[in-house]
Amino acid sequence: MITRIEMNNAFIYQNNAIFSMKADMRTKILADNVAQTGAGKVLKTACVFGANNVGKTCLIKCVRAIRGIILRQPCQMSANLFSGSKKVSLAVNFIEQEKEWRFAFKLDMATRTYVYEEFSQIKRDSYGNESLDTYYKRDYENGDFFCKDTIAIPILVALSNSDILIHAVNPGHFPSLKKTAKMLIAFASRIVIVDMNNIPVEKTILMLKTHSRLEGKVRKFIKLADLDLDDIFYSDKIKVKVLPQNHAEYLPAETILQAQNLEDQLRLTSVYKGREVQSFKFDSTGTKKIVALASFVVEAMEKNQILLIDELDSSLHFKLTRAIVELFNSEQNKGAQLIFTLHDVSLLDCKKLFRKEQIWFVEKDNEGARMFPLSVFTASKGVRGDTSDITEKYRQGLLCSLPNPRFIDYLLESDTSEDNDKKEKKGEGGKTQ
């Protein structure tokens, strides 16, 4: 589980931004929303609110970059456009094997080299004070190199810094580096990221097609969503005509929900009142998204994954969104984690759904973007958690800055421009006469 993310000069975050999943146990309400681990108590879910283009998606981009770098997968990384620096710093604290770990690095985007990298275990004494048990550190800016495997220190100095250490050297030869690689890869492999505007439906189709162990749970999840759907399954009995891939009749209206294998998608079958129909033709956009999302949610719960979803409320009824959050917050969930962005203010519920530290806001001004949790607003600031109307305070802009679109000005300016044009033309005509 993720416990903390630090972002500096990454994407929209120019100054150091911190996102935390640590539970504040001074608050006793909604105890089921907290997972008990050997390394402390961690929040099972967190939601991120904010206006468009302020940095919600950038948080997910940062996690995607961390995962990609650890697993050597293609990923997007960008320094802040206005900082003047090309050096991006990211750090993540996470729990693996009941212990908390920290992985931090600084990447120079100009040279594509890691000028700093560190991996440590976070330890706490009986008073809760934290200390770092460092496994290795490579600090090229200050010439500081350390490794628990002392024999590896000269190698660290000589190695290329175009990749992180676990990929630049064979960690199997060094006990501490071998443990480092195991922890990092296990953690990154459990991160799953979903964009609700581009959900791959292949995962659901594959589970239904191959009758995997999770097939029944995926079908049950979809049916329990109360979509007026009796059942859904993959039918290999449907005869599929071989037509051009761009044939309009055989493509879903929503291109974002098209499967790479069109024939498989044509065989996805929904049942309404006992009648079998092709899902891509008859299901609504929201239903299609639930069908695609179902496999990700079920697998996350079964395998204790870390699921990040951008725009969770896109095309979903608010009760569906709420039900998914309640699933992850439930007592039955022991190790899965859900972090998501959204705009739906109906989920700003500190009475039945979220603890204050589970709700985060992002806002942006001339100095950059910043993140902060609802828990920074204390009773003295008029926010009392389970007794305050958080939704109303958010709508009033008391919790974070909100957009103030004035499209009416466009019409007024257009009318004024037209009047001026008429006056100019009339004046020109008068001169001609």
Image: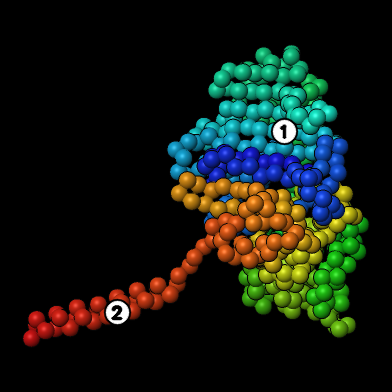
Give the image location of residue 116, x and y in percent: 60, 27
Q: Amino acid at mark 1?
A: Arg
| Residue highlighted by disc 1 | 102
For the question of whether residue 225 can be seen, the reply is: yes
Q: Nearer the viewer, residue 185 or 202?
A: 185
Q: Nearer the viewer, residue 390 or 108?
A: 390
| Left-right relation of 112 to 21 | left
Quadrant housing the N terminus: top right
In primary-sequence order, the first of circles 2 and 1 is: 1
| Left-right relation of 156 to 84 | right
| Residue highlighted by disc 2 | 418
Residue 101: name its quadrant.
Answer: top right
Give the image location of residue 93, x and y in percent: 72, 37
How far is disc 2 from disc 1 in space, using C-alphas? 61 Å
Q: Secondary structure at mark 1?
A: strand
| Mark 2 nearby-residue class (10 Å; few <14, some 14–19, many ≥20) | few
- Residue lying furthest bottom: 433
Give the image location of residue 350, x and y in percent: 74, 59
Give the image location of residue 186, x and y in percent: 80, 39
Give the residue displayed 45% in from the left and 72% down from the top: 407
| Left-right relation of 226 to 58 | right
Residue 8: name its quadrant.
Answer: top right
Give the residue displayed 81% in from the left and 42% down from the top: 41
For the question of whether residue 162 can be seen, the reply is: no
